Amino acid sequence: MLPRLDIDDLISPLYQKYLDTLKSSGYRGDISCQYSARLAVATDNSVYQQIPQAVLHPKSVDDISILTSLANLEKFQEIQFSARGGGTGTNGQSLTPGIVVDLSRYMNRILEINVQERWVRVQAGVVKDQLNEFLKPHGFFFSPDLSTSNRATIGGMINTDASGQGSLVYGKTSDHVLGLTSILANGSLLETMPLPIEDAEAKATLDTTEGLLYRTALSSCGDNRDKILAKFPRLNRFLTGYDLENVFDPSLTQFDLGRLITGSEGSLAIVAVAKLNITEIPNVRALVNIKYDSFESALRHSPDLVEAKALSVETVDSRVLNLAKQDIVWHSVKDLITDVPGVVMDGLNLVEFTGFEQSDVERKITDLERTLNGDQAKAKGVIGYQVTYDLGSISKLYAMRKKAVGLLGNAKGQAKPLAFAEDTAVPPENLADFIIEFRELLDQHNLDYGMFGHIDAGVLHVRPALDMCDPQQEVLLREISDKVVALTAKYGGLMWGEHGKGYRSEYGPEFFGDELFLELRKIKTAFDPLNKMNPGKICIPLERDDKLVSVDDKKRGAFDRLIPIQVREDFPSVMNCNGNGLCFNFDSKSPMCPSSKITADRRHSPKGRAGLMREWLRLLADKGVDLETLQQGNSGFSVKAMALKTANTLRAKVGEYDYSHEVMEAMSGCLACKACASQCPVKVDVPDFRARFIDHYYGRYLRPIKDHFVAHIETLAPIMAQFPRTVNAGIDNPVFSWVSKKVLGYEDTPLLSVPTLEQYHSDEQFDEFDVYALEQLNDAEKAKTVLIVQDPFTSFYDAQVVADFMRLARNLGYRPILLPFKPNGKPQHVKGFLAKFAKTASTSAEFLNELQRLSIPMVGLDASLVLCYRDEYVQVLGEQRGDFNVQLSHEWLLQELDNLAAEPVTSNPETFKLFAHCTEKTALAQTEKHWQQIFKHFGLALEPVSVGCCGMAGTYGHETQNKQNSRGLFELSWQQPLKQSPAEMQLATGFSCRSQVKRYTDKKLQHPVQALLKHLN
């Protein structure tokens, strides 16, 4: 039986007292002390792990002021903070042993825009893409372009002075900050903006905290200006920590104290609000992807491309390209990056041009093409190129490039590409030689790696593959890190060109030199004399003996190596999560991850759940628990086991702690939509390990009644369908609704189909299933036969869809045969009844394999059930799954198009709107495109609607505990698009989706096959 798991990483008494006091201090935000909440922010996209004492989610500037003011009291002066935004840092910038102040949950509002003056004011938790989505209708955008732009917050961008693609033209984040509202460690408010030098000097005379800051900054930055200019290389982007140079403008007539805060990694103050300048969106964009015979050729050709006056030049090596080809993202770009016949493409440069006049951009492209077609370019390794002016295509290419970081993390084996020396910056003219020597360094250790970066700015992203579960590899990480520091210095660059210092802060004194590093410490002392703000990062205040964080500090691998290797190998998607955070995508139209979107809780995300599971596995290992033995003990029934479960459940109800409860809370919020299994770059498959965890969890505790109901739905539905009117009458009354809600925990139970599928089948006089008769068919007859695989939801609750598909097949000249209903087992898997699921899957697979030998197509209508045959069946049955193939309706129709007469598209046809099932369109990337092909074949127009999850997801939306989130997800993504066209033109492939729409709008959407049937009739 699963043991109870306690934890020894408890909140210290001082922090507990502080948090108790905070609750009664007027603070209105959230206070999260659960171990799971702390774990969720203990990592970022780096190799490090540091569990904080608590997580605070302030709702306002006042909240931040209250929490810092309270900590300034003498009894709480040891309390420390670190601000956190999207959590995408690659060097542990926001990790802290103190309190994490997460601004992303509530402080994410766009406050004000002034189009005439071209600025916007936002809270620090606003996501970069969220801001640009808001600005787009006004014709503007916030220009620093990050690969993490769909989850990186403005506060995080400011704290790391983020840049990204196009920085030669658009600069860094600090170049666009017009003003900051920050809160200091003592709780006071600091407003910063560019000031005339005279005003700054006047402020320096004040006997206040603000006066001290101005005096210190003017002295440190002004008195040492010649040393500063002489010390730092003239690079487009580099991170000094505190921007000593740019507090003054080039003319030395203006002074901006805020330039010290940008890039300070939260070590000086907590940024709450920012006023930003905005850039007009160019009217014309064009992208040239240039292909090379080697990565070195791509690098050495880059100066020519910069001279072509491009906006940006981004490079990708063959390693990243090959990984992209194995990912779902490749379907969207394969026509834009075609192979060159007879030549291996080992490098790629993406060169973008923008402008406000088509002719200007076309002229630049023409000039570039002239050089690319010449002998000189061929001698430099150019083997081909493609040009596109299509905005959608450009976005797809950059989406592939942006996903490169995550794709590198999906490497096979125990060694994974790691971020620790991946944003070096050297003068662009030195980049090729620098990279050749960098490669030699890595090759000496036989390390695998991929490279990409902003070669126009001399910034390189390299992630060597290391296994942090191996202590010797951790030593190697330090060795390589030190050598890369020396190498970048040799080529006139910096170790941190883009992603900040974080745990590399120990290298600061080496790059700054003793004199300038002393000035950094003076600035830190003025802002934060007690070292409360992100301590250990950048520098330490004067007269304190605290230590800087180190490359050698505690890493995730130190915890992971405590998990037995066979367990790690058995839970790959748990262990492989590298924290890249793509699952935090703010976009409501993105299918991943619905629970994260609606809760704004980091635990309710693939990254959060994987992190909780890693710790669960570690705690089990610490207790010497063998998971395989534990699994065997979960099956079967005994009175003793039931008695123990009852006792454990009662103790849990009265408050007995078990870490497994916290994991269960996170798993219960998962919709099991499986978008993560394909959308996550490293393929974190939450529904897989979720089902396994639930199975173990209920080996110790009693299951709720509702889970048993779901697990048996495939047995109950066929029985209930024998008496549909009677059952429906029972369901559709207040007494049943009350009992269902209070006892079963279910609401809005769907009604059975009337007429039933059996009645449709009889009335239409479809042929009965007779395996012997099917065996007698010749090949031509089999080619004109299709077997319909039933699922419990469509067959018994939406029977007309099945009947209409059979009518459609018959109208198209095929003979549809309805197979006997066989349980699929998906509901059992979702609820973690793994032993029962394995038995169901085995029985179903045996039946379907028998039919497979007939060589007659088998088609199912619900994506989640059909895809279960392809995914979960493989996971649980392995080779015993067999080779049967059940197609979805669009897959079968698509392959039969050549046999079906095509119809011309009518002039000005009405356009159907397709709302595709999220599981289907993420697992099968071409789903929407295929439906468009099918409709076009029949003379119809179809347009996919970009929506995320509808919020139903099988039985999830019917569970009382999920109803609020279910409705919230529907309103977040589906509600508005449904209002934009009539119901008869709206199509939904998912049974769950159609149910949810009917539930909240009374619209009855058709399945696409029903629209085709009506057209053919």
Image: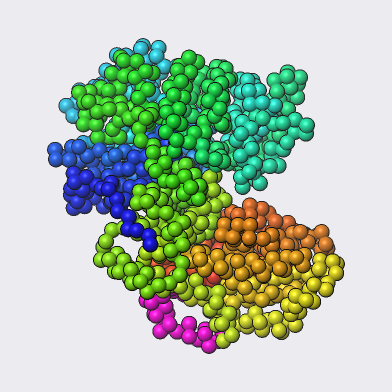
835 up-or-down from 137: above or below? below
Based on the displayed image, in which of its 4 quarters is residue 211 positioned?
top left
Which of the two residues, 631 or 133, is positioned nearer the viewer here?
631
| Relative image position of residue 72 (x, y in whole percent) | 18, 38
**Residue at 57% over, 51% down:** 678
Which of the two residues, 368 or 237, is positioned nearer the viewer here?
237
**Residue at 50% over, 60% down:** 672
Based on the displayed image, in which of its 4 quarters is residue 430 positioned?
top right
| Relative image position of residue 34 (x, y in whole percent) | 30, 52
295 up-or-down from 859: above or below? above
| Relative image position of residue 45 (x, y in whole percent) | 44, 39
The residue sitting at the left extreme is 74
467 relative to 529 in the view: left or right: right
826 relative to 183 in the view: left or right: right
Q: Quadrant of the N terminus?
A: bottom left
Which secondary structure class fits the magenta region best?
helix
Q: Which residues are magenta?
A: 724-748
Is 726 magenta? The answer is yes
67 up-or-down from 920: above or below? above
Is residue 25 at all visible to an observer of this figure?
no
**Residue at 83% over, 72% down:** 777
Q: Quadrant of the C terminus?
A: bottom right
854 relative to 311 in the view: left or right: right
237 relative to 511 in the view: left or right: right
